[in-house]
Image (cartoon, rainbow, N blue to C red):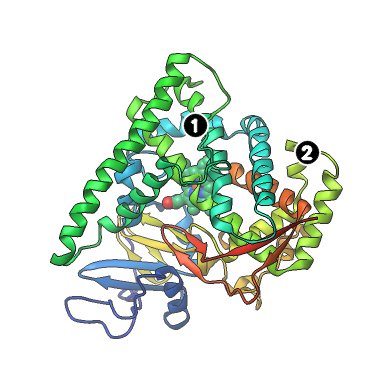
Amino acid sequence: MSTVFSQAPKRIPHPPKRIPFIGDVLGMDRDAPNQKTLERFGELGPIYRRTIMGTDLTFVGSAELAATVFDEEHWEKFIGRPLENLRAIAADGLFTAYNWESNWAKAHEVLMPGFTKEAMVSYHGVMASAVDELSASIERQGETYIPTVEEMGKLTLEVIGRCGFNYTFDSFTRTQEHPFVAAMSRTLTYAQKAGIPVPFVGKLLRRKDEEQNRKDYQLLVDTVDDVIAERIKSGERRPDLLDHMLHSDSDVALDPENIRNQVLTFLIAGHETSVNALSFALHFIAQNPDVARRMRDEANAVFADRDATYEDVAKLRYTRQVINESLRLWPTAPGFFRAAKHDTTVGDYAFSKGEWVFVLLLATQRDAAWGPDAAEFNPDRFAPEANRGRAPELFKPFGTGIRSCIGRQFALHEMALALATLVQRFDIEPEPGYELVVEETLTLRPKNLRLKFSRV
Ligand code: HEM
């Protein structure tokens, strides 16, 4: 399909002070690129392009334009640079597979049954006991300001480890980081840095990093392969993701290397985004005692003196509103890439087949369509009556279309259960004078967030 314009198509705006040959490098922020991009939309409009050494990076920041690139008929997921770098670990796992790789469709078919309501019911007990262990771990630490991201990380890692592969990292009992977790965290950092050219003096250091990375990756692979081999040997059947991969309901079978890539994928995708989302939500809860009170009233009304059941979690409507609002303001996956399937347009601009954009959720989810207070935290905007008729492109924290998040219900269930339980059991206080600073890695997270939990 080719696009016909009555006039020459417009050129996409770019930041001022373009440097010949090098391009739009001024005004970039290596530490907080997504937050910098958010600011830029204010000056340059809802779409703009940085051209760096001949490569175009186009950013979309309004819900209206985002709706165009969410249209699956004309646009599709694109494996942009950060995802390309992740392929060093997760290869053709679900998250980083190219659309054309046959293993994506196979794994999607094999793994979808692992995320049905029936599957979620079977994970509930595992999640609930991990939440209890988290609550006990918090209580043991007494009334101190607890590093929140680290503490919530214990929960999300245990939940994905146990529900995914019946594997525990002993997060709540160990005093030192698990070697697998340390290796995973180093390989992720290495993968993200790998694409960045280093000056000559940095090359020696990089060689040392390369060596460490080889060892780390080997440890990840050996651990995962052991878990898989043990399960095969035991012949045991369990209600977890690994079982779905080893005993698919369909005719499709995944090869052993791909199963390993899926396990690594779930450990990355199922952990980072959820822990940060939980932490942002706790930040807002600590900053807004009236929100905490409403959540506690709701939890007490739904499960006062007993453990929450699977069905109870669906009744935590206000808690869900708090989670949504937190994910709206600080989507922990700050955006995603979309590529044109054929020559097409976005607004007044022409795109050729294969050209791609990065949709910055940080901007689209604060679109003026949310009202003049779009930048403020207000869970009531997700109340059923306020929410009726809202355009879907205004809220896409879990991505869009066929390649959207397979773990969405899993994450929402885990977060609602954890937050309702914590709010019911503890008063949660912020550190005096804490100002939210958002740190950027592959995901967004609240920097140095420490909260005090006092048993009610
Ligand atoms: C708050 C938590 C989470 C957020 C915000 C989130 C966000 C996302 C987003 C935006 C995408 C699409 C990325 C793209 O288009 O490039 C995605 C995909 C994915 N997510 Fe999540 N996610 C979360 C939790 C989880 C959990 C708990 C799991 C696993 C249990 C998971 C597994 C995946 C997988 C496997 C994909 C790739 C799906 C595919 O392409 O077929 N995510 N997620």
Number of the label disc, if any, that sits on residue 111: 1
* Left or right position of 252 against 362: left
**Circle 1 residues within 10 Å: few <14, some 14–19, many ≥20:** many
Is residue 190 at all visible to an observer of this figure? yes
**Residue 194's quadrant in the figure?**
bottom left
For the N terminus, the quadrant is bottom left
Say which element carries label 1. helix
Residue 180, above or below 231: below
Image position, residue 220 (x, y; %) = 36, 37
* Distance from Cα at disc 2 to Cα at disc 1: 29 Å
**Circle 2 residues within 10 Å: few <14, some 14–19, many ≥20:** few
73 or 266, nearer to the observer = 266
Image position, residue 47 (x, y; %) = 42, 72
407 or 204, nearer to the observer = 204
Amino acid at pointer 1: Leu
Closer to viewer: mark 2 or mark 1: 2
Mark 1 within 8 Å of ligand 1, using the beta carbon? yes
Q: Which residue shows up at 74% across the image and 65% down it?
A: 380
Mark 2 within 8 Å of ligand 1, using the beta carbon? no
Are the two marked residues, 2 and 1, in contact with CB atoms closer than 8 angstroms? no
Image position, residue 322 (x, y; %) = 69, 59
* Left or right position of 410 against 424: left
Amino acid at pointer 2: Asp
Say which element carries label 2. loop
Is residue 4 at all visible to an observer of this figure? no
Number of the label disc, if any, that sits on residue 134: none
Q: According to the image, label 2 marks what residue? A: 307
